[in-house]
Image: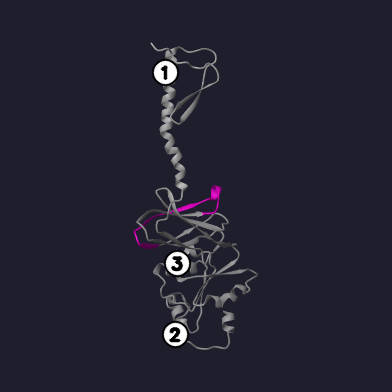
């Protein structure tokens, strides 16, 4: 018969199995019978074996934060209105994902730059065939001030692509004017117009920047349309504008040589239907209005 194993009577005894180890306290007072010691060691080895089996899964979890090659994927992101937003309102995003590589199946994530309890992650399922392009419209509503958003593509818990987008959120009492114009720079002076001492920020927009939900327009106080074809407005964009106007938004549509294209998609929202172009020398009536 083999002699019983030698077990130290003081300090800690280390049981080892593969790369896993565990410290086992030893009773200093008296030695237990051999069959009890054998049962104890069998239980310890079973526990260590179970821990070793689970260890690879625990170590694999951080891989969700590991970047992998994008494989032909690219992102184009427009946030807010020309990057302009307003505190405590929705921030619309227009994200274009292009794929020149193999088919992609995963998620589009939008993260705010906040931390702690107010941090938010918005996720949308995304499938994109090879050599395909998709435009996604969404909005986020941060709970406080932010200076950037982060857009990610994720597949099988791996981050494939990341893009950070700066935003300039104005205080709620400041004026944000969206400008849809053929020559936006010609209207830069509007930022200096007096309005009860409030500062005005111009947001130079494209027609496609207009969201399809009225609430997503809340950051705009005024929308100016000048010498730009509005005939391409979608029914959803038109309905959103109607809702925004009903909640207090202000729409300004200029005349001039391009009045027909400026009014093309907005006729039902104008106070009158323009029919011709004429020259005037006195704007007092407009001031009174």
Dot 3 or dot 2, earlier in sequence: 3
Dot 2 or dot 1, earlier in sequence: 1
Q: Which residue is outermost to the top?
A: 1
Q: Where does residue 79 sit, x and y in percent of width and height?
A: 50, 62
- Res 240 label: 3
Element type where label 1 sits in the image: helix
**Magenta-drawn stretch contains 129:** yes
Indicate left or right for 147 with 6 as reference.
right
Q: Residue at x 54, y 13 (%)?
A: 29
| For the residues bearing labels 3 and 2, Cβ distance under 8 angstroms | no
| Residue linked to disc 1 | 39
Instruction: Give the color scheme: rainbow, by chain, secondary structure or one colour.
Output: one colour
Out of 232 and 216, give the one closest to the viewer: 232
Gap between marks 3 and 2, in whole Å?
26 Å
Gap between marks 2 and 1, in whole Å?
98 Å
Q: Quadrant of the C terminus?
A: bottom right
Q: Which residues are magenta?
A: 112-134
* Placement of 149 over or under 284, stated as above or below: above
| Residue linked to disc 2 | 275
| Mark 2: few/some/many CA within 10 Å (<14, 14-19, 20+) | few
């Amino acid at each position: 018969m083999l002699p019983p194993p030698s077990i130290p009577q003081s300090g800690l005894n280390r049981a080892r199995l593969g790369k896993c180890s565990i410290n086992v306290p030893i009773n200093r007072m008296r030695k237990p019978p051999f069959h009890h010691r054998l049962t104890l060691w069998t239980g310890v080895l079973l526990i260590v074996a179970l821990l070793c089996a689970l260890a690879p899964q625990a170590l694999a979890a951080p891989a969700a934060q590991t970047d992998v090659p994008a494989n032909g994927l690219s992102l184009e992101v427009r946030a807010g209105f020309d990057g302009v937003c307003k505190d405590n309102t929705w921030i619309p995003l227009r994200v274009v994902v292009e794929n020149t590589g193999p088919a992609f199946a995963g998620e589009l994530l939008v993260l705010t730059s906040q931390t702690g309890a107010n941090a938010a992650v918005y996720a949308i399922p995304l499938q994109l065939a090879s050599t395909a392009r998709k435009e996604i419209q969404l909005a986020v509503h941060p709970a406080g001030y932010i200076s950037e958003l982060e857009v990610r593509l994720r597949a099988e818990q791996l981050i494939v692509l990341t893009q950070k987008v700066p935003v300039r959120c104005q205080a709620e009492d400041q004026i944000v004017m969206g400008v849809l114009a053929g020559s936006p720079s010609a209207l830069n002076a509007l930022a200096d117009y007096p309005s009860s001492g409030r500062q005005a920020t111009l947001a130079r927009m494209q027609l496609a920047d207009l969201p399809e939900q009225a609430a997503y327009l809340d950051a705009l106080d005024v929308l100016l349309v000048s010498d730009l074809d509005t005939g391409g407005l979608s029914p959803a964009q038109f309905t959103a504008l109607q809702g925004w106007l009903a909640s207090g938004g202000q729409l300004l549509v200029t005349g001039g040589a391009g009045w027909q294209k400026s009014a093309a998609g907005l006729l039902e929202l104008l106070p009158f239907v323009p029919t011709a172009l004429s020259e005037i020398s006195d704007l007092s009536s407009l001031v009174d209005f």
